[in-house]
Amino acid sequence: MFLTISTTGSAQRPATDLGHLLHKHPEKAQAFSTSYGTAHVLYPEADAEHCTAALLLEVDAVALVRRRKGKGRGGAPDAALAQYVNDRPYAASSLLAVALGSVFSSAMRGVCTARPELPGTPRPLRIEVPALPARGGADLVRRLFEPLGWTVTAEPVPLDTEFPEWGDSRYIRLTLLAADLTLAEALRHLYALLPVLDDAKHYWVSPDEVDKLLRVGDGWLPAHPERELITRRYLSHRWSLTRQANERLELVRLAEADDSEVEDLDNAVAQEAEADDEEKPTPLAVRRREAILGVLRASGAARVLDLGCGQGQLVQALLKDPAFTEIVGVDVSMRALTIASRRLKLDRMGERQASRVTLLQGSLAYTDKRLKGYDAAVLSEVIEHLDLPRLPALEYAVFGSARPRTVCVTTPNVEYNVRWESLPAGHARHGDHRFEWTREEFRGWARTVAERHGYAVEFLPVGPDDPEVGPPTQMAVFRLGTPKEAKAA
Ligand code: SAH
């Protein structure tokens, strides 16, 4: 069983801080004995820019079966041989979660006495699990991790690469990326969700598991859209414990909803100000918002969707203009929506203002009835966050199903990247970008979408339009039912 945790860094914030956070020195390979076998921690790479910690758990399958004898629920009754020949040694399951919890217990609690400032600071994280048993498949994996702020890649592992016709196994290869989570949050997500996906806990679930789940779920589980499934599976379908856990989580959720601490918002604002500093005099993000507002005003839209609204900056700008009577922000990330709602001070807003704005959690990769019937939709810097194979699903959900009269899409122009001094050649602007397109690629995509769904499309530059490489941001404006395609600007 194998899992890696990677981060990136710089001379000022070295990636090797990961060693401090995990309390495991990058230059040493260490072994820890657990009740199911030996856990090894080693670092395949460790320098200021890149650092990866690997957790390898060698499971003693025979000891596992012996321990299990006579202990309450142990999954379905296994045939004698299957007890000894099983997937436990290979696949990342509840055993790996237990190993994570014991080997990295201080990291999971967010404790680092030597460098107390480290655990609370989010850093870019990449987690890979090459073989994860996933009951519910890639789709469930996304529903579990995306609302927590992860970008998820879940690829089914074929049963046998030499015989593709045999189809996929029940395992997936999982990659998780996040830019604004702390390591402690990441470990707590894994600790709770690996066994949920495995759905075959290897040990007896005792009543104190409810307390444990509430502890690791602190800050993310109470408002998670899949909370019921998570508690049910984590507690091995023991109904009385599941009910007890859900009641307690609901109380926490209600208390948190009242909580008006604005710490996250302040952080978000500070981060934005920092990011904005890079691009004087007018930050690109501001120019983008102005360009989008211009398009929306010109279209005469009153009811507007901000799809992938993130932390709500555009929603906030739209609220300032009374021409927009109904504004709906949609995002897959609960974390982003929480920050957005604090930014907008939704809980302290007057009734009239509040009636103009709604924040919805949802994934744009699925059609959603709630999004039908709007005048306009914005996809600002969103499409590049989806894996290319999932883009047609978004395309259908927006242009095929929701079908607003106007759709405004922005995305980076990769040709412009050579003009960013701070960007190393060949790098995307953001670690989460799945692709960045040239002007030709973006236009090709947009024209196909427009044609397929009966829209006309026009292209506009955002930011300085460089004669050679074009503008930093490219924008396409789609209009429903306009007879012929408007020409490129
Ligand atoms: N529109 C904002 C935020 C862009 S960042 C802006 O212009 O500043 C991209 C956002 O898209 C993130 O908040 C991310 O959570 C969201 N996102 C990514 N994939 C999504 C999906 N499948 N469904 C809904 N939102 C998604």
Image (spheres, grey):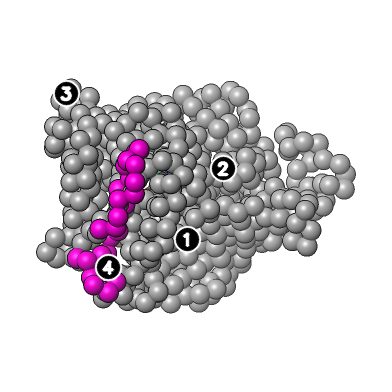
Residue depth check, mark 4 versus mark 2: number of the one nearer the observer: 4
Q: Earlier in the sequence, mark 4 or mark 2?
A: 2
Badge 2, how many Cα within 10 Å: few under 14, some, many 20+?
few
- Residue picked out by circle 3: 352
- Tell me the amino acid under the disc marked 1: Arg
Of the numbered discs 3 and 2, the one sitting upstream in the chain is 2
Q: Point out residue 108 in the picture as x, y percentages from the top left corner.
A: 46, 52
Q: Residue at x 63, y 30 (%)?
A: 237
The reply to whether discs 2 and 1 touch (Cβ–Cβ < 8 Å) is no
Say if 392 sits above or below 397 in the image.
below
Q: What is the count of numbered marks?
A: 4
Q: Measured from the top left, where is residue 23 in percent x and y?
A: 46, 64
Q: What kind of element bears circle 2?
A: helix
* Local SS, label 4: loop
Residue at point 56%, 27% (across, down)? 242
Q: Which mark is residue 139?
A: 2
Bounds of the magenta span?
A: 464-489
Q: Is mark 2 within 8 Å of ligand 1?
A: no
Mark 4 highlights which residue?
A: 470
Q: The residue tagged with tag 3: helix, strand or loop?
A: helix
Cα–Cα span, label 4 and label 2: 38 Å
Marks 3 and 4 sit apart, C-alpha to C-alpha, by: 42 Å
